Image (cartoon, rainbow, N blue to C red):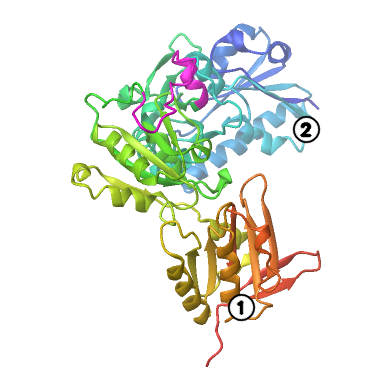
Amino acid sequence: MGRLYGVGVGPGDPELITVKAARLIESADVVAYHAARHGRSNARAIAAGLLRDGQVEEPLIYPVTTETTDHPGGYQGAIDEFYAEAADRLAAHLDAGRDVVVLAEGDPFFYGSYMHMHKRLAHRYQTEVVPGVTSVSAASAVLGRPLMERDEVLTVLPGTLPPAELAARLTGTDSAAVMKLGRTFDGVREALTQAGRLEDAWYVERATTDHERSAPLAEVDADSVPYFSLALLPSPAATAFVEGDGKGAGRSEEAGRPAAGSESRPGAPGGSVTVVGLGPGDPLWLTPEARGALAEADDLVGYLPYLERVATGAHQRKHPSDNRVEAERAAFALDLAKRGRRVAVVSSGDPGVFAMAAAVLEVSEDPQWKDVPVRVVPGLTAAQAVAGRAGAPLGHDFCVVSLSDRLKPWPVIARRLGAAAAADLVIAIYNPASKTRREQLVNARDLLLEHRDATTPVIVGRDVGGPQEDVRVTTLGELDPATVDMRCLLIIGSSQTRAVARSDGSTFVYTPRSYPAE
């Protein structure tokens, strides 16, 4: 029997064909390639200089591409029948002892037509796949813009996805390549706009060929876009250096004044403030909406440790500040927005839960900022993160209380804790202790023990989602306040909350959804 080869010939420039691919093409008995009805094949055109007299050529002509068909099985039926017939043609050569090379533009397994032959033949014949340079790599090289750096994530997407789904995926990645443009171009541009990534997107057509074209995607006429083109979102971290700013886009280290270059954007739409929740710490907990809001911002404002969790694009500036100046930070962000800047104020967890959303909205009541749009993008809360690690302690009615008495007096906190305990609510406790607040948790535990049994399950979650994560299950009677600090969140169970030991030594905690009748 002959041997089947799926050979990638690269994106267009014949000099990008690998040495191995060239050797196999030259020595093959049969060279096959896919083509539309007009008979022209990009893959064959790339490899034309390697073909020799005496070789058998097998053009595999698609019966339908984008037009309609009267096939009883519709488009998919026509395509499936074509692939089956094409595989039979190649199998006849292989059975006769001829080696068959199937040419594939780019890489055979990267949105390539060859894979349909592979699925039908590889289990019957000796098969080898020879990788090729992809159009994504070629586009990156043509633009001179890296695809990804350090821990950045590259996502490859088909432009045939619905714009809403495409936008969600674009907001959830650092860099991206969107394939199969052509008739999908308008939808892809809409998705990039929805995701706040249009200004960073590039268009590349027929990379490395004589007909190569590239431009900012926002400037491209949809009617001029062929199928063999793609949209590229290069590495956000590398963009600053590509644009010539080797210092990383000049970031402000002072929250008391705007950074150089933070002046209003001439001709830009009005500024705005978006308060964004980053989640508790794990990057996987950052929502696509939050990622999109961060990518769209001109300025990022927040507490320094939170800002360090956000990658910065070339057009962005960070403005870090201390954690105890919420009102000043809010005013600074509103002032930037008033001058036309798109500002993202970042918070850990959810910005509306003991965080920056309330501070920004309160400061925005000042008449000088009444015309500045403010929106809040929610995030995963610390209470949800700790609860998820432990099981389902928030499975029934619960409340959330902060033990910090910096902005409210302790008697108010004590009354609320007492009321929640008397009502038999599960209680999530934020800000349980700090270096200067050690007695509040001691007093809170004593107060709760007046209403709850000492065996009530308690979850202590520390740095959940972070590198020093620790989740412990204890009881209200055994809770040691000395082991709790500001990075902890506590969940105090109700009378119905159960801690169940598992055979693997772990313990899960849950609160049943039903409650006994009184």
In front of the other: 458 or 43: 458
Which of the marked residues, 2 or 1, is nearer the chain's N terminus?
Answer: 2
Residue 449 badge: 1
Say which quarter of the image contains residue 338: top left
Please provide percent x and percent y for residue 467.
66, 44
Mark 2 surroundings within 10 Å by alpha-carbon count, few (fewer than 14), some (14 through 19), many (20 or more): some
Q: In this view, does 511 lie above or below 371?
A: below
Q: Residue 323 carries which label?
A: none
Q: Can residue 323 be seen in this view?
A: yes
Q: Nearer the viewer, mark 2 or mark 1?
A: 1
Magenta region: which residues?
Answer: 237-259
What is the chief secondary structure element of the magenta stretch?
A: loop
Residue 260: within the magenta?
no
Report if residue 257 lies within the magenta region.
yes
**Element carrying mark 1:** helix
* Residue drawn at (58%, 22%) of the image: 134
Compared across the picture, whether 224 is left or right of 204 comes to: left
Q: Which residue is drawn at 63% across and 33% down?
A: 115
66 or 81: nearer the eye? 66
Label 2 vs label 1: CA separation?
74 Å
Residue denoted by label 2:
125
* Residue 1 place in picture, x, y as percent: 81, 27
Residue drawn 51% across the image and 25% down it: 237
The local crowd at label 1, few if under 14, some if 14 to 19, many if 20 or more residues have their Cα within 10 Å, is: some
